[in-house]
Amino acid sequence: MAKILLTGDRPSGKLHLGHYVGSLQNRVALQHQYESYIFVADVQALTDNFENPNLVKESVYEVILDYLSVGIDPNIATIYIQSQIPEISELTIYYMNLVTHSRLERNPTVKTELIQKGLEESFSVGFLCYPINQAADITAVEGEIIPVGEDQQPMIEQTNEIVRRFNRIYGEGILKECEALIGKVGRLPGIDGRGKASKSLKNAIFLSDERDIIKDKVFAMYTDPNHIKVSDPGKVEGNIVFAYLDVFHEDKEEIDSLKKSYQKGGLGDVQIKSILFSSLEKILFPIREKRKTISKDFVMDIALNGSKKARKKAMVTLEKVRAAIGIKYA
Ligand code: ATP
Ligand code: MG
């Protein structure tokens, strides 16, 4: 039997180039090889967007549209919505007993996100516990291969700790461990040069951005602040335009020679940005066009049917878990 691939995204906005290289490309490439479960984590998105439920609701639809636009095939992969599988919430409650408060606070991703989101002084219990919720997402469908970006590696470790602890206490082999599969680029930087490209930080090029928006974003990209005149020697390290060219421009030799000219002086930011814009447009044009052909009814149909299928699988896991813990009275 094929192994199970599981992964998801938070509906806190539309998907961007970071998702594309960090996780989506792997999902598309592997959907024929593994039994794929791909979900939109609306319950998790609410942990830091609880005051903005409309954003979450609208983004569920937008994220699924993004999946279909990049080539995830709904006839092969099961696409579903986290909140429609209440079994995940019940699993989360049981797993909460297996994780200490201090372990959650030490989770490097949680730490970084608290700073990024300005939540260090005051954050909800729900937010702190979202890594536990992720362990429930993964184990509910017995996910083994998890395509994610680098920032999610600590979440996979946390999941495996929960799995091992559960199995030690309630019985070996009940829950399965999983492994992260990091994409071609584990961490695409934001266009502003601060941290990773992220929906919440609004520093990303979205897969659905129109041509003019992409152009504006590329031309506003962070380069080398000391590269003022075209003739000035420029820095390539930390220069976001070159970081993106490395990822998205096909001709690696051309990039090498551009880097050399830039470092020497004589190559302007406008030139390198124009080249990057063309490379991105080549990738994003077909995605954007496909997006326009998909109706909202079709998206919701897929999501609700997928949720029914995923729920059946989660029910089996929950029954196993309840029985192992001894919560079974009939
Ligand atoms: P938010 O700001 O709301 O956390 P996000 O942009 O970080 O949104 P997520 O939904 O949290 O997106 O992440 C979905 C998946 O995409 C995860 O596997 C994550 O690791 C991956 N991912 C997100 N941003 C990047 C990036 N910049 N580079 C590579 N992978 C990324
Ligand atoms: Mg994130």
Image: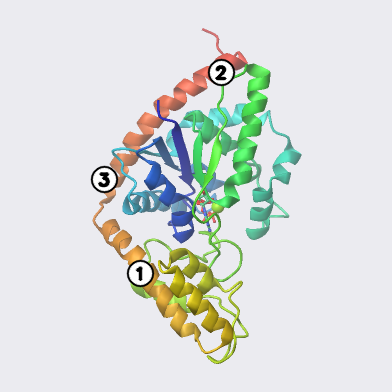
Residue count near mark 1 (Cα–Cα under 10 Å), binned few <14, some 14–19, many ≥20: some
Residue count near mark 3 (Cα–Cα under 10 Å), binned few <14, some 14–19, many ≥20: few
Instruction: Please state which amino acid type lies under the numbered disc 1.
Output: Glu
User: Contact, CB < 8 Å: mark 3 with mark 1?
Assistant: no
User: Contact, CB < 8 Å: mark 2 with mark 1?
Assistant: no
Q: How many labels does the image show?
A: 3
Label located before the other in sequence (2 or 1) = 1
Compared with 303, 321 (above or below) is above
Label for residue 322? 2
Q: Which of 250 and 201 is in front in this view?
A: 250
Instruction: Please state which amino acid type lies under the numbered disc 2.
Output: Arg
Q: Distance between the residues labelled 3 and 2?
A: 36 Å
Horizontal arrangement in the rendering, residue 65 relative to residue 252 (left or right): left
Percent across and percent down for residue 317 are 49, 23
Q: Is mark 2 within 8 Å of ligand 1?
A: no
Q: Nearer the viewer, mark 2 or mark 1?
A: 1
Label for residue 298? 3
The residue indicated by pointer 1 is: 281
